[in-house]
Structures are given as C-alpha cells and as structure tokens.
Amino acid sequence: MGTGKKETSRKIRQGKVEDGMSNVKVKGENFYRSAKKVKLLDRLTDGRPQRNAAGKITKSASFQSRQLPNARVEPNRKWFTNSRVIGQDALKSFREAMAERASDPYSVLLKSNKLPMSLINDTKMENGIKTHAAKIAVETSPFGEVFGPKSQRKRVKMSVSSVQDLVDHSSKSYEVYLDRLEQTNLLQGISHPADEIADEDKSDDGCVKSAQESIFNKGKSKRIWNELYKVIDSSDVVIHVLDARDPIGTRCQSVEKYIKEEAPHKHVIFVLNKCDLVPTSIAASWVRYLSKEYPTLAFHASITNSFGKGSLIQLLRQFSSLHSDRKQVSIGFIGYPNTGKSSIINTLRRKKVCTVAPIPGETKVWQYITLMKRIYLIDCPGVVPPNTSDTPQDILLRGVVRVENVEHPEQYIPAVLEKTKPQHIERTYSIRGYQDHLGFLECLARKGGRLLHGGEPDINGVAKMVLNDFIRGKIPWYTSPPLSEDKQSDGSKGIAS
C-alpha cells in the first residue's frame, strides 16, 4: 500500500477531512531531511567563511565582513544654524539662583528634566567620577610599579607640595572617612562597637563603668530599618512627626540627611503633634523655628476634636496638584516611636484604620491607607537612630521604651523633677515638703496607699506611675526653642497653662 493510500485511510479512520499531506515526506530531493532540519544545518554552516585552495577568504561569513558600509549624514538645516551654547558666567549665576531656591523650604522645583542639571550640579564629588579617576590611576601606575622592589619610579607622584600640606590632607581625609563611617552606621541602624566607648566611661583597667539595658535598644533593629526604607522609597512626600514637647530630641537627623542626599526629589514636612500639651506661644515659636528648614504644621490628633487637620489636608492637596502628572501621590509618616503617627492617620480618616496605643511599638509593619482617590497614606513603625550622646534617661523620657520593662525606674525620677517645675508636681499630685526624689516617691506612695508588706512604700510601682504620667502628658513640661541672644530666656522650663 502506498503512502497516499495509508494517509487516506488514516484520515477516514480518525474522521479528518482536511488535507493533512503537509507532514508527509515524498521521495525526492529532501526525502531524508525535513525543512526544519535543513534550516538548522544552514544556521550551523552560515558562520563559516568560504576559502579557496590557497586558504584566502573568498566569501566572508555572516557578520564578519571587514568592509564597513558607507556612512551617510542626514541632511538637516540645523547643521548650518547657530548652536545652543552657554557661558561660564551664565552657569555661575544659574547655580547661585538654584542654590538660593533649593535652600527655600517653600519652593518646589518642577520639570527638572527640562533643565541642564548636569551642567549646574558640581560633579567633582560624585562617586562615579571619583571611582573612574581611581581606576585610571591604578591602570596607569599599578602598585607594584610604584612601591616595592620592582618599583620603576624613585619618587612617588603626590598632589601636595610640602609635608605640611600632606599632613593637612591626611587629617582632612581621615575626618571625612570618620564622618562617612558614622553616617553609614546611623543609616544602617548600627551602634558604635564596644572599642569606641569614650575614655571617661572606662576605668583604669579598661572595663566599662556603666552598662546599658537591652530594653534601650528598641527601635534600632534591622527589621525596623527595612520597614523605614520601604516607606521612604514608596513615598512622594515624607511627613516627619515630632513631639511638640521636645521636637529636637525626636528628630531623626540621619534620616533627614539621607533623604536630602539620596532622594532630593522627595518633599519633607514637619508635623508637631501633641501641641495641646504645650502653651500656644511655645508651639508657635517651634513652628517659626523649624519652618526655616522644612514646612512645619502644628497638629493635635483626635478623631472628634482635632487641630490642624484642615491645614494638613490642604497641604497634601497642593502636593497632589503639583504632581498632577502622576497617577497617585503617596504620603509616608516617619518618626520616633509614640509620637502619634498612627493617630494622625486616624484623624485624617475620621475613623480607626490603624491600631493605636499609649505605649511605643504598637505599629509593627508598614501599611497603606487610602485617604482620597489620588492620595495614599503609609504608616511606618517608629525608628530610633543610634546616637552616642543619648543617655538611657533621655531615651526613656522620650517615650521610646515601655516603662514596665525598665529595671529600677526610681533612678530616672531625678530627671523628671529636673525637667518640670515644683509647682507643676505639687499641682498634679498635691504633695509638698519633699526633699529629694526618694522622699517624693515615698510621700506619693503613702498618699495613694501603695504599700508593700510591713507598711513599706512601693517605690518601684510609684516610680513607674510617675514616668507614665510624664510621658503621657499628665505632668506639664516642654522645651523652648533656641532664641536669639537678645531674647534668651532664663531656662528651658516653661509654665504651662
């Protein structure tokens, strides 16, 4: 039976009526090779040049011809007109104008792609330029040719003319290295190692005089910093929430520097939360002081009775209109723990969309909340940048850690009495006549009936209660902003109304 009859019977058996002879091989030229096999062999032999008996190439392989095609320049009228050039004087004036505008917190640069920013920005300190220069220096003069027994140069080429210039250059380079190392550690959430502890904190035998509890390392973990970088990368506008009682102490200077250097296109806003705990004049002074760096708003977070909500929403709408070309605008909230980031989001939404608590560390991960059709809010866990100048009592009184987990809380009561005035303590607890912090705690324990077995006052429990009252605003206290010399006040303590 022939091939055609076999195919016909197969089609009848399978119920196929269309022509299925396309895959049938007929005896002839390519009976033993299919079309697919022929194409594969053509591709394999296409990369080989053809040579004559003498070995010379008579026909080059594909993409191996040494003859370049004839180039042709497109005829255009612009080749014969004036070119767009700019002088150094114009660039200098433009740089000065841009620097002046960049320092203004209320100016926003739009459509920067249409400006010659590569000519305006100083590229001498760019990492790419420095890396390229170092690579060229290593390639032109390797280390083995300059130093060692195989050196070909008797004198090393240096960019200084005297020994004093070399000393100044070395000291300056070392200071720059230390600054960059400290900045890197701060941005990565790494504290200084134990060998960098100050000499005054060490005894004669090299042992550290005081140890810090592990509870004071809260807010510095790698997980928290990863959440922070997620929020910064996803945000178009970053709102830095500060405590109105201590704005300088709750500022994240390293995070602000990171945003200014690595993401200058992102907008930063300061929000002074808990402004109801300080006098109006102090809140206004802090707003004027911080407005020199970034736009600052006073805010009181409350779903039913808030302050500053309309101003903040209006500011967010202005940013939304400035970036009208974007599909959406994301607003990220960052700051110290227990400053009220989640409470501000609940205030803007007028309902509870984020879990809040009067204790730090309630927000664990970042989360998106829809405010409007084009405006989204991002909640972030509180972060604490490592700082060697911060003492445990400073960290505790800022509300970073939970008071119930602190050992020997009575040792931090002197700092509370120092930050507040005696009349405020007397008015809050109705206690007078105490001599020191232990006497104050004993009087408060006996007045409230906080006694242990045998009539001993519960100093530990009363100290925790006082610390919670101090952090949550029951005890009036605040810090005044730095004033000019002619307006210096006699202290940082104020009288709360």
Image: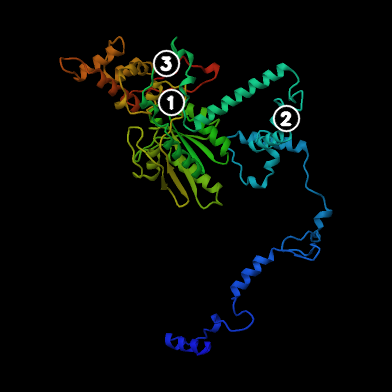
Q: Give the residue type that dot 2 points to.
A: Glu
- Residue 100 image position (x, y, % from top left): 65, 33
- What residue lies at 80% left-to-right and 55% top-to-bottom? 78
- Residue 25 image position (x, y, % from top left): 56, 81
The mark found on residue 145 in the picture is 2
- What residue lies at 29% left-to-right and 27% top-to-bottom? 404
- Residue 370 image position (x, y, % from top left): 42, 49
Disc 3 is placed on an element classified as loop
Q: Which residue is denoted by mark 1 in the rendering?
A: 246
The answer to whether the residues at label 3 and label 1 have Cβ atoms under 8 Å apart is no
Identify the mark nearer the N-term, 2 or 3. Answer: 2
- What residue lies at 63% left-to-right and 71% top-to-bottom? 39
Furthest toward the front, the residue is 53
Q: Which residue is denoted by mark 3 in the rendering?
A: 208
Residue 300's place in the image compared with 46, above or below, is: above
Residue 352's place in the image compared with 5, above or below, is: above
- Residue 348 image position (x, y, % from top left): 40, 43
For label 2, the crowd category at 10 Å Cα-Cα, with few meaning under 14, some 14 to 19 and many 20 or more, is few
The Cα–Cα distance between marks 2 and 1, rounded to whole angstroms, is: 58 Å
Q: Nearer the viewer, residue 394 or 347?
A: 394
Q: Give the residue type that dot 1 points to.
A: Asp
Answer left or right for 452 relative to 416. left
For label 3, the crowd category at 10 Å Cα-Cα, with few meaning under 14, some 14 to 19 and many 20 or more, is some
Q: Give the residue type that dot 3 points to.
A: Val
Q: Foreground mark, 2 or 1?
A: 2
